[in-house]
Amino acid sequence: MGRDESIDIINDGGELVQAKSPVIISASRSTDIPAFYADWFFHRLDKGYSVWINPFNNVRSYISYSKTRLIVFWSKNPRPLLKYLRRLDETGIHSYIQFTLNDYEKEGLEKNVPLLQERIDTFKRLVDRLDSDRVIWRFDPMVLTDRISKDDLLEKVERIGNQLKGYTKKLVFSFADILEYKKVKANLEKNHINYRPFEKDDMEYLARGLMGLNKSWDFTVATCGEKIGLEQYGIVHNKCIDDELMIKCFSEDKQLMDFIGYHPENVQLELFGGKSNPSNKDKGQRLFCGCIASKDIGIYNTCPHKCEYCYANSSKMIAEANYNRHKQNPYFESIVGM
């Protein structure tokens, strides 16, 4: 199956336009669609398409859902998805959730997310509705500041992990790469957060601590997009858009399996454990990202969480203005209502 093939669709204005038709949708690395745009997304799913705006040149592209077989949701508060999961089941489209569940309440780094216990309750409710393979816990990113030490981070992870034992199979984490991400550095400095970059010793200290905690949880522990290898501690490199998880959970879906290149009956592929096609890697992501190809439908500067370290918002004011514009036109083709 071709990647993001173009097809003709009729848009809301009655025009015939060309649209990309991705098999896997990412919703989204760029904003929190489940928390703030769930009504918009499921309306657009019913309509069969939405509009994505390129952040570098503002070019608008049509994204058709006619061939979509899987949606990967990313969120810090996916509670609004609960009322839509049955509708998603009825479409026959599969899903799983990357649930970022941090504990920065005391330090105020995530002022607009719900209380921690409410988010943990949401996590458990989603697992009860889906299963523990399909709701993945992310502690992302880990941030060191003058108020958050390495041991503080381990205590935060422990408090959450003890409550999620039996509710998920995987913990994914990353180290805040402040010097590499100019927007993150600028946002932290603008918000007077006295951060400290991670050194190799810090990362290894946390790796040892996490794997010590994991003796009682038995999660798969993985890093997201990190250059450093921590395999000696039992920590693997993650694939957030994960072909292996798709094979495990959705192997009966021939269209999805064809897209990722998984053919268990093929003797040649069986020599490699029946795994999917390595050429399907998403070349648009960071060098050490393991994700396979998907189409992200989110837009930067639209997330009202407005976390202090955010890489997706360059300005809280712009994010708020875009969200207000969305609320004035909540079912428009694009998230930003224009």
Image (spheres, helix red, strand yellow):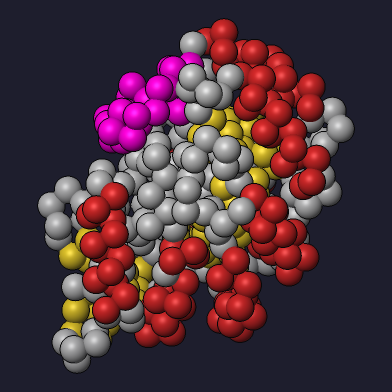
Residue 269 highlighted magenta (yes or no): no
- Residue placed most toward the observer, 112 or 233: 112
For this view, does 333 lie left or right of residue 114?
left
From the viewer's perspective, is 123 left or right of 227? right
Instruction: Residue at the far right: name it.
Output: 216
Left or right of residue 283: residue 175: right
Q: Farthest residue in the bottom direction? A: 14
Looking at the image, can residue 188 be seen? Answer: yes
Q: Is residue 145 above or below residue 279?
A: above
The residue depicted at 52 percent of the width and 68 percent of the height is 69
Q: Magenta stretch?
A: 175-198
Q: Position of residue 128 (x, y in %)?
A: 77, 65
Residue 2 location in percent, x, y?
A: 38, 60
Q: Residue at x 38, y 57 (%)?
A: 304
Q: Position of residue 292 (x, y in %)?
A: 47, 46
- Residue extending furthest toward the top: 201
- The residue at the point 64 percent across, 50 percent down is 116
On-image quarter of the C terminus: bottom left
**Residue 271 visible in this rendered orientation of the protein:** no
Q: Quadrant of residue 118?
A: bottom right
Q: Residue at left 18%, top 89%? A: 13
Q: Is residue 29 above or below residue 160?
A: below
